[in-house]
């Protein structure tokens, strides 16, 4: 019984012991599993941390094999994570970089600090330039660096696939066991391709800048901002100043700059240095080695080079431009023939003299040469020009230094007297001028006797304008002409108010041209068959400030007589072409038409007329094919040879010519074939009797048939009735104009009518 109990107890104890052992073992496994899970989690976290690093990291064993690599390293090498493990890192490196990499490896294994080395990785996506850094991985069980063997180095030969196998075999037997005892190596590298590209681009930009700097055709200098000294200069600047480059470097530009221009540049330079502006430009004078100054356009801007602020200074020689500009300014303000101030310059100078001048302290003398037109018409413009130059010289010898002498136009001169102390001063000067002009002049064996009609006025009121003063002097000059010429007249207000209307109109006409009071009106020219508008004839109208709208009959004869027709005609041609250009720029459909502009006899015989027409076409941008010039038959017959020459020059521009008022001149049928015209216009006085008066009808029929026979277009003027239109169509007349199609209209009305239509 006792034995049984003992056995039972022993069995229970054994079971308990086994159970306790099992439980202890299970707890140990659970703790181990938890620890392993913690370790795994820690490793996973560490792995994630490494993978999130922007820098590529690899762990290599002593033989150079990859033990692990983060995501950046895998991506940079262009392979799969598993393909990198156990591969030799040197196999990923360009063969040309392996020797340098081995050397760095050895120094790192020896405990030296190795500077990052540029290495080219060869991957699936091509070659990538990286910057590699080595350092040994620390192992707590290994001795300190003081106990290590400095002979440790990686199995670099095995890691190099380019090394012959025989060389590897010789070293393997000696070093293999030793290498396996070496510590692991951490390799960090980052992609520097973009940085290198930027560096190369920067170097290339610098080379290009240097090349452009030294080969630039304009002078250039690099100047330090802090002390103003020249760091570098190009050959163009040295040649501009007549120096060598080394004579410029180290000096300041101020040393070569005109003192006045140095002071002028101070505020510009201050604004640049304060950052208010990015650059500035001004013209300065620089001293040449020969002592002369050269004008240069200087442009200065800031740049930075290795932390040093520099001013890039461009210096362009503009001496010739300055000289040309001065010549152009002189030409714009002076008469080409006499060298005297011209009309525009006179108005400016007279305005200055009148500004703040007390009453009766400024006087104007209006000098007009008598019968000058006769000299031009009989002896030619060459003799006339020489006579004008001689008279200008005589006038210079008479007027005082502080007075103003100007050519007003044609044969008219103006003398402005300032500092007038006595009422008799203007009269005395005028008489002195008149007597000085009396001396005979010899030109081309022609002895010429010249007289002048002189009128003068003064600023009787302190607020008088230049135009008012000239108006009064002009009126006084015409009084002198009315008295028989070769005399002096003072302006009288009462006489001015009651003077001859024609003389008043002449002065007003001149001012009307100056003030652009005479404007173009446009009358349509239509195709008689279809009624389509082909163009417009330009007709002058004077918008007189006091007398209202004046027709050509009220002022054109006077303009012809006084020589103002040339100026008036130029004004009409310029304004009408400008108006057509404005219409075309606005996109009006009716602007695709032609303009017909009348040309007077004086204009046609003016040697400069053809050049003027070309210049006006160029200024307005109107093609020559859009312009017709209408010349009266009487103008053509006045001087057939001269007219033919001028017409041929005009046709060479590409414009068109027509004969106006055809049938009113003499010998028209025999002379017409000489002129390079393309159209003839039937005068309105014949058209008015068409179908009513047999004689008028016969003339119109003859003109139309003549035009057809000569291949010329025929244009009928003054068409006012349907009967006239019908008869002209029956005759085959090409074009026509008149009240039946439209009266002359100002530009604004033409626009509104055409747009509404």
Image: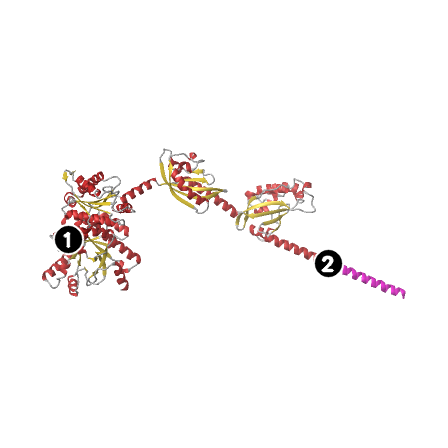
Looking at the rendered structure, the secondary structure element under dot 2 is helix
Q: Which mark is residue 29?
A: 2
The disc, 2 or 1, on the residue closer to the chain's N-terminal end is 2
468 up-or-down from 391: above or below = below
Q: Given the current orientation, which residue lies at the most extreme bottom position? A: 1
Q: Give the range drawn in magenta.
A: 1-29
Q: Mark 1 points at which residue?
A: 633
In terms of depth relative to the viewer, which is nearer, 232 or 553? 553
**Which is nearer the eye, 731 or 362?**
362
Residue 436 visible at all: yes
Magenta stretch: includes residue 26: yes
Image quarter (top left, top right, bottom left or bottom right) of the N terminus: bottom right
Instruction: Please name which of the two marks, 2 or 1, marks the residue nearer to the observer.
Output: 1
Q: Do the residues labelled 2 and 1 touch (CB within 8 Å)?
A: no
Query: Which residue appears farthest toward the front when viewing the image?
Result: 422
Q: Which element carries disc 1, helix, strand or loop?
A: helix
């Amino acid at each position: 019984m006792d034995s049984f109990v003992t056995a039972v107890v022993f069995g229970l104890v054994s079971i308990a012991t086994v159970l306790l052992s099992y439980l202890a073992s299970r707890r140990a496994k659970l703790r181990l599993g938890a620890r392993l899970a913690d370790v795994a989690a820690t490793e996973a976290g560490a792995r994630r941390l490494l993978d999130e690093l922007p820098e590529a990291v690899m762990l290599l064993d002593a033989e150079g094999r990859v033990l692990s690599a983060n995501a950046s390293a895998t991506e940079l090498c262009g392979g799969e994570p598993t393909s990198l493990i156990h591969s030799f890192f040197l196999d990923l490196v360009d063969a040309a970089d392996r020797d340098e990499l081995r050397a760095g490896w050895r120094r790192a294994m020896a405990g030296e600090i190795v500077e990052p080395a540029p290495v080219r990785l060869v991957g699936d996506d091509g070659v990538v330039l990286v910057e590699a850094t080595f350092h040994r991985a620390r192992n707590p069980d290994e001795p300190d660096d003081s106990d290590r063997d400095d002979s440790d180095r990686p199995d670099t030969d095995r890691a190099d696939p380019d090394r012959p196998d025989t060389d590897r075999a010789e070293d393997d037997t000696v070093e293999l066991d030793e290498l396996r005892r070496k510590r692991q190596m951490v390799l960090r590298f980052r992609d520097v391709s973009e940085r290198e590209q930027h560096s190369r681009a920067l170097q290339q930009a610098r080379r290009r800048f240097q090349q452009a700097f030294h080969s630039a055709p304009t002078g250039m200098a690099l100047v330090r901002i802090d002390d103003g000294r020249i760091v570098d200069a190009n050959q163009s600047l040295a040649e501009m100043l007549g120096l060598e480059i080394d004579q410029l470097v180290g000096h300041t530009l101020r040393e070569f700059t005109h003192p006045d221009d140095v002071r002028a540049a101070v505020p510009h330079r201050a604004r640049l240095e304060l950052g208010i502006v990015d650059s500035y430009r001004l013209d300065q004078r620089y001293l040449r080695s020969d002592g002369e100054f050269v004008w240069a356009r200087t442009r200065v801007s800031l740049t930075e080079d290795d932390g040093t602020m520099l001013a890039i200074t461009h210096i362009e020689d503009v001496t010739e431009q300055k000289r040309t500009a001065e010549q152009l300014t002189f030409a714009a303000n002076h008469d080409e023939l006499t060298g005297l101030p011209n009309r525009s310059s006179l108005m400016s100078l007279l305005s200055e003299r009148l500004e703040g001048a007390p009453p009766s302290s400024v006087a104007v003398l209006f000098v007009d040469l008598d019968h000058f037109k006769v000299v031009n018409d009989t002896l030619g413009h060459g003799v006339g020009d020489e006579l004008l130059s001689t008279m200008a010289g005589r006038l210079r010898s008479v007027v005082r230094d502080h007075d103003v002498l100007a050519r007003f136009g044609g044969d008219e001169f103006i003398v402005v007297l300032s500092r007038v102390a006595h009422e008799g001063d203007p009269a005395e000067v005028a008489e002195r001028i008149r007597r000085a002009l009396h001396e005979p002049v010899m030109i081309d064996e022609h002895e010429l006797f010249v007289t002048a009609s002189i009128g003068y006025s003064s600023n009787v009121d302190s607020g008088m304008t230049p135009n008012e003063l000239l108006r009064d002097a002009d009126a006084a000059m015409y009084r002198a002409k009315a008295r028989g010429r070769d005399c002096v007249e003072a302006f009288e207000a009462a006489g001015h108010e009651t003077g001859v209307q024609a003389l008043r109109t002449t002065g007003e006409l001149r001012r009307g041209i100056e003030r652009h009071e005479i404007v173009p009106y446009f009358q349509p020219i239509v195709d008689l068959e279809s009624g389509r508008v082909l163009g417009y004839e330009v007709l002058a109208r004077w918008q007189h400030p006091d007398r209202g709208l004046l027709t050509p009959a009220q002022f054109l004869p006077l303009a012809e007589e006084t020589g103002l027709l040339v100026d008036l005609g130029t004004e009409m041609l310029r304004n009408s072409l400008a108006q057509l250009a404005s219409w075309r720029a606005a996109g009006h459909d009716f602007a695709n038409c032609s303009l017909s502009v009348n040309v007077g006899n004086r204009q046609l015989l003016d040697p400069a007329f053809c050049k003027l027409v070309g210049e006006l076409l160029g200024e307005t941008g109107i093609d020559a094919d859009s312009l017709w010039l209408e010349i009266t038959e009487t103008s053509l017959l006045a001087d057939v040879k001269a007219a033919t020459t001028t017409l041929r020059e005009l046709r060479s521009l590409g414009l068109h010519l027509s004969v106006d008022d055809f049938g009113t001149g003499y010998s028209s049928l025999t002379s017409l074939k000489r002129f390079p015209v393309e159209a003839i216009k039937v005068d309105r006085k014949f058209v008015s009797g068409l179908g009513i008066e047999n004689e008028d009808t016969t003339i119109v029929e003859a003109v139309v048939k003549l035009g057809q026979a000569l291949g010329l277009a025929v244009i009928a003027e003054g068409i006012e009735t349907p009967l006239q239109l019908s008869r002209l169509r029956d005759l085959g007349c090409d074009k026509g104009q008149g009240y039946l199609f439209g009266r002359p209209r100002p530009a604004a009305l033409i626009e509104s009518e055409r747009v509404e239509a």
